């Protein structure tokens, strides 16, 4: 790849970068405090450092690549697989080409440095770093959380508009070493997701973000070939498709087109361009802080009943904005106080004066609780009020009502 790295493919990389900024996946990831964002950043830095080492023969950058890959592992365990598959794909692509020798020294130096850091980390935190626990956890998740969206759709959403250049690179697969490397890297990196593809297992867009680096490489290769090798007609067709998809990727434009009688079929491409709505969770910190003040500002003990329409993350934040946990609290053993269960099935805690639950098993149990505690109902603002309650607090998205004694 060194010879091709000298080609002016920076234009393709720049086009790919701008297209990803226009993708809905970028808007989604940039607004989430998830580990995939720094993991992808570290993963990209690790690959770039390794490529620069191969180009300049400066082994310090191979060691830096191993360090960044290890840091990516500490942020998101499965992200290191993508880097390891690059270490495998690069010599395989070089060996097939046969024009240049495989740069074993940089590859071994990068792998050795990452392995040494992992060994020290595993010894310090034994047995938490044992990969068998991660595999057992991943296998245990299958079947528990069925996917709402096919995984292949989420893969296209994760890559966003980068797929235009990536799919275009297939035209030059036989002559572009960069395209061959990119597709080999992507296929190898996607192998752990094969069961999810075949069995429709649990998956979210952010989980596939670790595949963005190989898709970006393919996009850069595709756009470079389009700019340098294709005719004006081919460029015009791909540019027109890109402009149309980029426009549709803007939520306001999509909404306007979907409302037109002649453009309603635009909804067929939506699943491949937009992150599913159920993955977009706005944490509304100001509203949840206000609700926390209303709940914990009351005198005496209280019971807060919330239905399934209120995500547990919201309850976690309401509790977070409340009083600090006691110094000897052990949430690992005692469990999260906002865990969902019937109120009469959750034991009271001396350190918690608010009991979070989903309701009582019988009207008599509810009447008994109302005689001893303040019983509150938390629900969405547009939900019908519960009989026998009076409004205690209101925000744009939520209402907090109290049962009258």
Image (spheres, grey):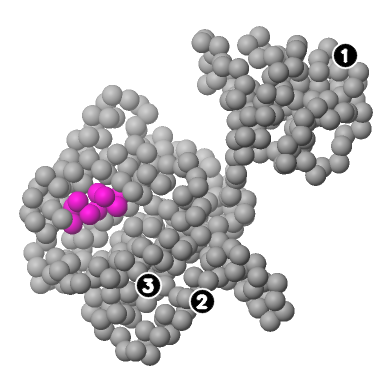
Residue assigned mark 2:
244
Q: In the shown orientation, is residue 332 left or right of residue 78?
A: right
| Relative depth, front residue between 157 and 153 | 157
Q: Quadrant of the N terminus?
A: bottom left
Q: Which residues are magenta?
A: 43-51
Q: Tell me the SS state at disc 1.
A: helix
Quarter where residue 325 is shown:
top right
Residue contact between numbered discs 3 and 1, judged by CB atoms under 8 Å: no
| Relative depth, front residue between 243 and 89 | 243
Q: In the shown orientation, is residue 270 left or right of residue 64?
A: right
The x, y position of residue 75, in whole percent, is: 37, 39
How much space separates mark 2 and mark 1, taking CA atoms? 63 Å
Crowd class of label 1 (few under 14; some 14 to 19; many from 20; radius 10 Å): few
Residue at 18%, 61% (x, y): give it: 91
The x, y position of residue 30, in whole percent, is: 46, 49
Residue at 55%, 70% (x, y): give it: 248
């Amino acid at each position: 790849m060194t010879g091709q790295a000298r080609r002016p493919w920076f234009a393709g990389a720049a086009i790919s970068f701008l297209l990803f900024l226009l993708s809905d996946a970028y808007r989604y990831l940039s607004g989430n405090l998830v580990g995939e964002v720094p993991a992808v950043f570290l993963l990209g830095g690790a690959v770039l450092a390794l490529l620069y080492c191969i180009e300049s023969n400066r082994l310090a950058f191979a060691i830096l690549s191993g360090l960044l890959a290890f840091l990516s592992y500490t942020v998101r365990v499965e992200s290191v697989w993508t880097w390891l598959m690059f270490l495998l794909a690069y010599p395989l692509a070089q060996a097939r080409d046969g024009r240049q020798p495989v740069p074993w020294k940089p590859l071994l130096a990068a792998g050795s440095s990452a392995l040494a850091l992992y060994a020290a980390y595993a010894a310090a935190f034994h047995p938490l770093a044992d990969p068998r626990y991660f595999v057992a956890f991943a296998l245990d998740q299958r079947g528990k959380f069925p996917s709402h969206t096919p995984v292949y759709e989420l893969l296209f959403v994760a890559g966003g508009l980068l797929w235009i250049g990536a799919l275009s690179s297939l035209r030059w697969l036989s002559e572009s070493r960069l395209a061959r490397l990119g597709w080999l890297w992507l296929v190898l990196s996607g192998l752990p997701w094969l069961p999810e593809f075949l069995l429709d297992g649990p998956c979210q867009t952010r989980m596939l973000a670790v595949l963005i680096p190989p898709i970006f490489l393919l996009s850069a290769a595709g756009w470079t070939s389009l700019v340098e090798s294709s005719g004006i007609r081919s460029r015009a067709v791909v540019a027109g498709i890109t402009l149309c998809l980029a426009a549709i990727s803007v939520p306001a434009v999509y909404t306007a087109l979907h409302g037109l009688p002649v453009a309603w079929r635009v909804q067929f491409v939506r699943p491949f361009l937009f992150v599913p709505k159920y993955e977009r969770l706005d944490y509304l910190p100001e509203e949840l802080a206000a609700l926390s003040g209303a709940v914990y500002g009351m005198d005496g003990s209280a019971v807060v009943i919330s239905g399934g329409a209120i995500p547990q993350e919201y309850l976690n934040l309401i509790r977070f904005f409340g009083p600090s946990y006691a110094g000897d609290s052990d949430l690992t053993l005692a469990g999260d106080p906002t865990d969902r269960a019937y109120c009469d099935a959750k034991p009271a805690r001396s350190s918690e004066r608010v009991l979070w639950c989903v309701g009582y098993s019988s009207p008599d149990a509810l009447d008994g609780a109302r005689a001893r505690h303040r019983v509150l109902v938390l629900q969405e603002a547009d939900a019908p009020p519960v009989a026998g309650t009076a409004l205690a607090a209101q925000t744009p998205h939520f209402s907090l009502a109290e049962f009258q004694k």
